[in-house]
Image (cartoon, helix red, strand yellow):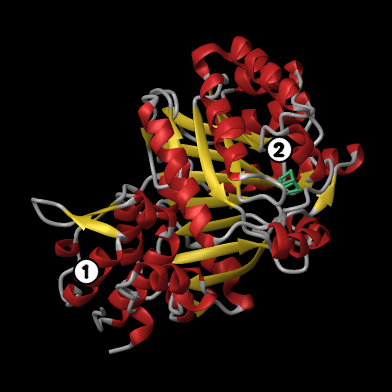
Amino acid sequence: MNDLFLLPEERTALLRRLSEKRAAPHGDMLSLLSQPTPPEALQRVWAETAPTEGQPLILYVHVPFCISRCAFCGFYAHRTDDAALEAYTRRLLREIEREAGRGAFTEKPVDVVYFGGGTPTALSADQLRRVIGAIYRHFNVAPDVEFTVEGRIHGFDDERVRACLESGATRFSFGVQSFQTALRRSLGRRDSREEILARLETIKAICGDKVALVADLIYGLPGQTQEQWLEENVKTVHASALDGVDLYSLKVFPGLPLAKRMETEGWSEEERAARHAAACDWLAAQGWRQLSCTHWGRNALERNRYNHWAKTGADIVPFGCGAGGFVGDRSFMQTGDLAAWGRMVDADEKPLASALLKPANHRLRARLADQLERGVFDPDDFPGADLSPLLENWERAGVWVSLPDGGYRLTRLGEYYETKLAALLTGCLLSGMGGR
Ligand code: SF4
């Protein structure tokens, strides 16, 4: 029995173990068991790629440009520039048209479009209309599609909002991160709390109930007190025009200046887990619906389809420089090198950098993610692995509670550690060894 799968029964030791990087040593076991596709086979493999029966279809469109770099971001790629954005838009349209011309994904209804980045809202109103319009023109977009445009509130003016709305976007996802003005500015965000709230009201007034407004908030930021997290952020969400919110614990990539501040000003794991619980309990008490371990919706406008389906096995067709995708048994990564991406698009190639063939039982992780995202785990859905010692141990440790009709429900502590629990369970199930 591998004790790396064992979570200590005692609560303090459990927290210590889960907060270690090694807590989930087999977290990427799926990657370890995956086979890289030889570079010379990438174009042929893509040419043979077709929709997976029974899975939702997602189109993911990436825009790797931002007006500036935020202090906590490990994804920043390129600074916005009018000429570069126009050149990028033209090539993106060419990539979309070429894929549509192949025809493999043009008949099946598209359930979700996610326009992410970077910040797609960095594009002009005209560019947004052209890209969104191309998706609708070339693909069979379902009438109830969830079509998200991700971005910053700063610079997302009325013209851009109308361009998205009139072209068919149904959801705007903003990286607000915090409503605390001084904290925002120390992180490289430009607008004040008052400006964001006023802008959200205006966008809501323009879009009405045609578009869901959602935002990400981060807790555990250096300089943020635990009281401020609840009083100035979570409670502000409820008072704002937002329809949905994602609550994230701050993760800082090593090497960023913020990582240094985290050493002295960061929150402990126990504090973060407690703040996750406080925020969730507060939102639940106001009538918000919990849509995943981290995501909440105020009303039926917010469906959270992309976040859920992207983790649970949907086909994701990638477009754009640095976009990732997943179709059938393979994950795909498009080149993040802007010049190389441009050359490949100009040469009418799918601009892939790599692809991985997943092991035969890879869908097990999607099934597991589907359950944990909903805050439950039913071992009966995973026959063949004896998990009983693990299940009991984790219940004693406070990660979940058993349900009268079988299975388990994650506690707030389990929700906070969902990613690591998923990695641990995936490791146990894929290795077929059970655990404790
Ligand atoms: S806008 Fe988003 S992607 Fe761009 S630097 Fe800030 S956090 Fe990173």
| Image quarter (top left, top right, bottom left or bottom right) of the C terminus | bottom left
- C-alpha distance separating marks 1 and 2: 43 Å
Tag 1–tag 2 contact (CB < 8 Å): no
Picture coordinates of residue 346 (x, y %)? 78, 54
- Identify which amino acid the numbered label 1 is placed on: Leu
- Secondary structure under the numbered disc 2 in the rendered image: helix
Q: Which residue lies at the image location 45% right of the left edge and 69% below the top edge?
A: 18
Residue 164 visible: yes
> Where residue 200 sits: x, y (%)?
64, 20
Indicate which disc residue 237 carries.
none
Q: Nearer the viewer, mark 1 or mark 2?
A: 1
Q: Which residue is mark 2?
A: 120
Q: Is residue 435 above or below residue 224?
A: below
Give the residue drawn at x 56%, y 19%. 241
Binning the other alpha carbons within 10 Å of mark 1 as few (below 14), some (14 to 19) or many (20 upward) gives many
Which residue is tagged 1?
391
Rendered-image quadrant of the N terminus: bottom left
Name the foreground residue: 388 vs 166.
388
Q: How many marks?
A: 2
Q: Amino acid at mark 2?
A: Pro
Percent from the top left, x then y, of residue 251? 62, 58
At mark 1, the secondary structure is helix
